[in-house]
Amino acid sequence: MGDGPSRARLARLHVGVALAVSICASAFAIEVVRAVDGNALSWAYVFEWPLLCGYAIYMWRRLVRDERGHRAAPAPPHGAGDDDAALALWNAYLADLHAFDAAAKRSRPSA
């Protein structure tokens, strides 16, 4: 096996998000019917289930990206006192960015 993403893990992530979305959609539909029938508490759930579904999709995207080896690039430096300090921060940022890019190229599977 290589350093690439595990097919089994990716499959489990996809099945998990499909299950989560279907549960959230079903619960949303049930709560809408209950809310329209007069259950005031169900209105809170009408808004809660789509938020929970959105969170599940957000986490699924992050986990899939992590499994495939994509990581966020380092953030640029914020704030600086004088020009020398700003230049030192900028050079450190460029060094981090270069190291990130080199690591990403090494971890890519060859075609």
Image: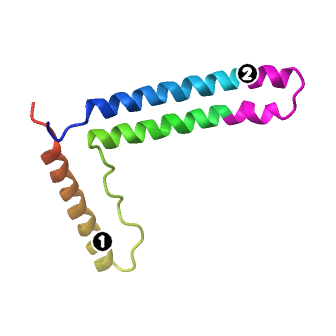
Mark 2 lies on a secondary structure that is: helix
Q: Position of residue 11 (x, y in %)?
A: 35, 27
Quadrant of image for the C terminus: top left
Residue that numbered label 1 is attached to? 89
Please tell me in which quadrant of the rendered image residue 65 appears: top left
* Residue at the left extreme, as displayed: 110
The Cα atoms of the two marked residues, 1 and 2, are separated by: 54 Å
| Residue 39 on image: x %, y % | 87, 28
Q: Amino acid at mark 1?
A: Leu
Q: Residues within 10 Å of mark 1 (few under 14, many from 20)?
A: some
Q: Position of residue 75 (x, y in %)?
A: 36, 58
N-terminal-most mark, 1 or 2: 2
Q: Which residue is mark 2?
A: 30
User: For this view, does 23 lie left or right of residue 29?
Assistant: left
Which residue is drawn at the image coordinates 19% and 57% (left, top)?
98
Magenta segment range?
A: 30-48
Q: Position of residue 67 (x, y in %)?
A: 31, 40
Q: Nearer the viewer, residue 36 or 99?
A: 36
Identity, as a three-letter code, of the amino acid under mark 2: Ile
